[in-house]
Image (tube, coloured by chain):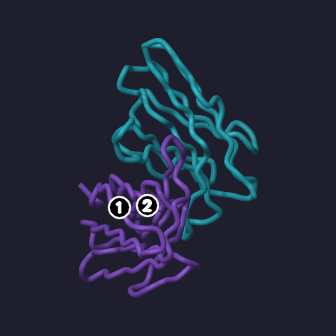
């Protein structure tokens, strides 16, 4: 079964450093998303991406965050200057259309120290 | 603020019984509703989605939607120990374009052999 692939599975970074989280969505999917889940809390929407541009972003997704689809397969989330409160599990997701549900990747656990 | 509320549980159900999980949402304009299952430390996995009032069945799972009451539920028949997980209710709060899912905090379900 097709899956969304995320790398790395775990990233430890120092506060203030830049991190790039990588995702390979399912190949025929058109909509791409990033969500995050702080330990013990709800899954939270960060951003959606369609037709090579951001279509919606949350208030969490401030100027420190950016997304890119640099080629036909990868979808990345960059955090420019990490803060302690950015520590969370970050999930990439994709969908073939806007009607059905997403397929989530296995996640990247980001720990900011 | 658009909210999705779930009883966090834990909900304990004997093997073979019906598990009933409930969710309410605040945005009356929401059109699509999703149930995800999340095992500890793993990513959410789509179980099913529903758009229309009434019931939708898929194997042992039945989703029920009542838009007038802003209520969605998930029934799991013939519960198995492998169904033990946290069940996340999610609501798409965007009327068009890419989805933006607002998740509930999840209900932790334990199936007792």
- Label 1 marks a residue whose chain is B
Q: Earlier in the sequence, mark 2 or mark 1?
A: 1
Q: How many marks?
A: 2
Chain of the residue under the numbered disc 2 shown in the image: B
Residue drawn at x 29%, y 56% is: B9
Badge 1 crowding class, 10 Å Cα cut-off, few under 14, some 14 to 19, many 20 or more, is few
Q: Residue furthest front?
A: B113
Report crowding for label 2: few under 14, some 14 to 19, many 20 or more residues within 10 A (C-alpha): some
The answer to whether A110 appears left or right of B64 in the picture is: right
Say which of A6 and A65 sits in front.
A6
Q: Position of residue A100 (x, y in %)?
A: 56, 68
User: Which element is circle 2 on?
Assistant: strand
Q: On the image, which quarter does residue A97 sit in?
A: bottom right
Q: CA distance from mark 2 to mark 1?
A: 7 Å
Q: Which residue is mark 2?
A: B112
Determine which quarter of the picture holds residue B25.
bottom left
**What tint does the image give chain B?**
purple
Residue B71 position within the rendered picture, expressed as x and y whole percent measured from the top left: 29, 75
Q: Which residue is mark 1?
A: B12
Q: Residue at x 39, y 36 (%)?
A: A38
Q: Are marks 2 and 1 in contact (CB under 8 Å)?
A: yes
């Amino acid at each position: 079964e097709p899956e969304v692939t995320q790398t790395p599975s775990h990233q430890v970074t120092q506060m203030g450093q830049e991190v790039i989280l990588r995702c390979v969505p399912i190949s025929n999917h058109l909509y791409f998303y990033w969500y995050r889940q702080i330990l013990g809390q709800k899954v939270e929407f960060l951003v959606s991406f369609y037709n090579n541009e951001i279509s919606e972003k949350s208030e969490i997704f401030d100027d420190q965050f950016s997304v890119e689809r640099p080629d036909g397969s990868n979808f990345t989330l960059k955090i420019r200057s990490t803060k302690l409160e950015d520590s969370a599990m970050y999930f990439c997701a994709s969908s073939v259309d806007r009607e059905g549900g997403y397929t989530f990747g296995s996640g990247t656990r980001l720990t900011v120290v | 603020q658009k909210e999705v509320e779930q009883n966090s549980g834990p909900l304990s159900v004997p093997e073979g019984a019906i598990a009933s999980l409930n969710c309410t949402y605040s945005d009356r304009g929401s059109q699509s509703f999703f149930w995800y299952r999340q095992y500890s430390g793993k990513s959410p996995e789509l179980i099913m989605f529903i758009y229309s009032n009434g019931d939708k069945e898929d194997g042992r799972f039945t989703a029920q939607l009542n838009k007038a009451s802003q209520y969605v539920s998930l029934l799991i028949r013939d519960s198995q120990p492998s169904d033990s997980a946290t069940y996340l209710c999610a609501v798409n709060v965007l009327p068009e374009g890419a989805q933006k899912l607002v998740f509930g905090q999840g209900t932790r379900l334990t199936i007792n052999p």
